[in-house]
Amino acid sequence: MLKSEIEVGYGLNKQKKKNRYLRYLQRDWQLYVLMVLPMLFILVFRFLPYSGLSIAFKDYKVAKGYAGSSWVGFSIFHKVFGKRDFGQALTNTLLLNILDLVFGFPMPIILALILNEIKNRYFKSIMQTLLYLPHFLSWVIIGGIGYSMFSVSSGVVNVLIKNAGHSPIPFLQENTWWLISYVLIGVWQSMGWGTIIYLAAITGVNSELYEAARVDGAGRLKQCIHVTLPCIRSTIVTLLIMNLGKLMGGSFERVFALANAKATQYTTTIPVLVYRWGIESGKFSEATALGLFQSVIGLTLVVAADLIAKRLGEDGLI
Amino acid sequence: MNQYQYKKPRAWNRTKRKDLVVDVFFYMLLIAISMTCLLPFIHIFAKSVSREAYVIANKIFLVPKGINFDAYRKVLQDTSIVRSLYVSVIVTVSFTAIGTLLTISAAYALSRVQLKGRKIMTFLIMFSMYFTAGTIPDYLLMNDLHMLDTWWCMILPLSFAAYNFLIMKNNFKASIPDSLIESALIDGASHFKILSYIVVPLSKPIIATISLFYAVGRWNAYSDALFYIKQRVDLRPLQLKLYYLVVAASESFKAEGGLTAGQITNPEVLKASCIIFATLPIICIYPFIQKYFVQGTMIGAVKG
């Protein structure tokens, strides 16, 4: 092994360049063998589908196959952009993500700051265990729990409201209320888990800073504002930018598990529309074009977010 | 000096009292927030074991009344639910085994600096994470590979995850000294030997973390099964079955399978028992796996 490494070092002159690759293969064949299956999986299940993207530019007919279908340029995209559903799906996707960001982003920070103030270790770890729980549940279960809690006739929240003498609230059956419930359920699901990164960042704060602040007469609130927050600023900024990159994303499972026939105004998001067009109605070309549109914008946003993060002197993501 | 010494205890007391008030407030607030994560389950559990009449009358809050387990007996008698649990277990176990093996081998190979083509392979893997072809090309690929309505469509496509690969690679780099592997190489050990006798035994916690990431992710996901499993009703995993039972039918309960027969007819009780039935596996192992998840998330946050 070592011998061949030395030979490679000597063999850098031009005549031996061709042999070099053979040598690398000879030396590291075991590593390449280890890579065969993972690369096969990536190529088959990740890269092969890229060829399927071509049908966004074709009038795809299942009977004709990829090659048999004729090229139509960007006309599929024109058709997609002209549809009323498309505008709605785009607006909804952005709206749901922006609301998630506005309400969901600060919550873990606040929660982490509160958890940090708790001195009793056992109490703290019990609280963390409870708060992390929703992260481990599937959206189907959360949807089921949501309906069990919030349905108009038998949901426990509405039963309590009715017992208090008020009229029940259609939490999941009316458009605006659905939107509010959707965001709140999302915040509830992710707030506990989101604290982990912030708590880790807070642990890393130099304790001398707190001592110095105390000597200067800073109370707990002042210590939090002038020591903790500035110290975890870079974590906050990085995560914020990462989340900005996800503005065009969308959780199919979350929307789908909470959607119902009574409140449909906000449930048509891009992933849901892709599903309806493609898998339910077999309009593969349109659905692929829509998905591609989302992926491209999503990738652009991620790259832009990464550039901004690096420009600001924070760690990038890529 | 005298004056200072005299004043100090009073100031200290005032701060202490204020501190206590703030502490109590924080404790109360946290208890209130964490209860929102706990009480729904207690409520649904109470519903699932109470007598039907109480549930219909909306009399059940947190304490079950007229305890009985008929609803669970009903769920267990429904062969399609038990079958879906079986499907979920098989799929999750094989998916996790394949995913973990692929991740370990790729992470080890690509953490060796001398490997030529390391950068391009890492790039290909990471690229696939940021730019996915999308639902429809994936679906058409499954169709072309004749994997629709088979076990494989739930086991193979997602089983090598770039994010998990990244976490494991970073961990290998940080926790296993290069000198150790180099000296083993000089002693004539093959990479396979090094991987199985040095790297894997030294990385048990991260391997546990990654396999749990795979397992919980697979257990909870339902969208791919929703897309790919159409005709073969017997291949529905638990979450998809639950989707059809509880969510899709949430407004008017269309009883599926064997749920119509028998004494219990109230959809609320049956739904509640289904939810608890499907949540129980997660809740039982959750306290033990939580710490691995926390570790994994922190390693994931420190990117390489």
Image: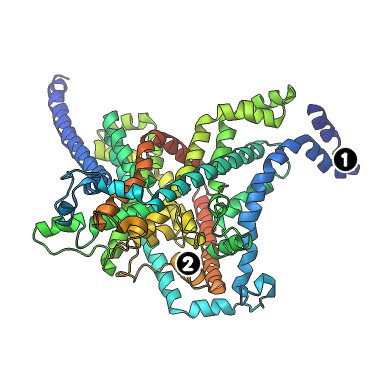
Q: Nearer the viewer, residue B17 or A36?
A: A36
* Colouring chosen for the image of the structure: rainbow
Q: Amino acid at mark 2?
A: Tyr
Q: Is residue B46 left or right of residue A81?
A: left
Task: Name the residue tied to disc 2.
Answer: A275
* A179 on left or right of A152: right
Q: Which residue is mark 1?
A: A13
Tell me which amino acid carries mark 1.
Asn
Number of disc labels: 2
Q: Is residue B118 left or right of residue A119?
A: right
Q: Chain of mark 2?
A: A
Q: Residue A303: percent from the left, percent from the top?
A: 54, 57
Residue A53 occupies quadrant: bottom right
Give how far apart the Cα atoms at labels 2 and 1 are: 57 Å
Residue farthest along the left direction in this orientation: A165
Helix, strand or loop at mark 2: helix
Viewer-side residue, B14 vs A77: A77
* Residue visible at 59% across and 54% down in the picture: B128
Q: Are marks 2 and 1 in contact (CB under 8 Å)?
A: no
Query: Who's the residue at 37% across and 63% down the image?
Result: A96
Q: Is residue A313 visible?
A: yes
